[in-house]
Image (tube, rainbow, N blue to C red):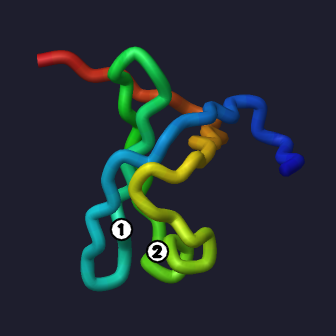
Amino acid sequence: MKLSARNQIKGTVVKIEKGATTSHVSIEIGGGVVLMASITNEAVADLALTQGASAYAVIKASDVMVGVE
């Protein structure tokens, strides 16, 4: 897999929550850290994602926002 995004983090799919049109895919990247992505149900099927499968979280963003309470 070749991508221009530099932030490619390998992990394991630990949860897939399917909604009407999108799914929330949780990927554990080590040390108990879990990243979640919202992708289409079609993408989940095309990628053949299942719990326990290896996957990459690919992060491409121009801005990162931080908030506090």
Residue 30 placement, left or right of 55: left
Query: Mark 1 or 2 closer to N-term?
Result: 1
Give the Cα distance between marks 1 and 2.
6 Å
Q: Which mark is residue 23?
A: 1
Label 2, on which residue? 40
Q: Relative to 55, say whether 19 is above or below.
A: below
Q: Are marks 1 and 2 in contact (CB under 8 Å)?
A: yes
Q: Residue at x 26, y 22 (%)?
A: 67
**Residue 29 in picture, x, y percent from top left:** 49, 28
**Residue 45 in picture, x, y percent from top left:** 53, 78
Q: In which image quadrant can residue 61 be found? A: top right
Q: Secondary structure at mark 2?
A: strand
Instruction: Identify which amino acid the numbered label 2 is placed on.
Output: Thr
Instruction: Identify which amino acid the numbered label 1 is placed on.
Output: Ser
Q: Residue at x 43, y 78 (%)?
A: 41
Q: Nearer the viewer, residue 59 or 63?
A: 59
Q: Which residue extends farthest left?
A: 69
Q: Nearer the viewer, residue 16 or 8?
A: 16
Q: Residue at x 57, y 71 (%)?
A: 48
Q: Relative to 19, say whether 39 is above or below.
A: above
Q: In which image quadrant can residue 5 be found? A: top right
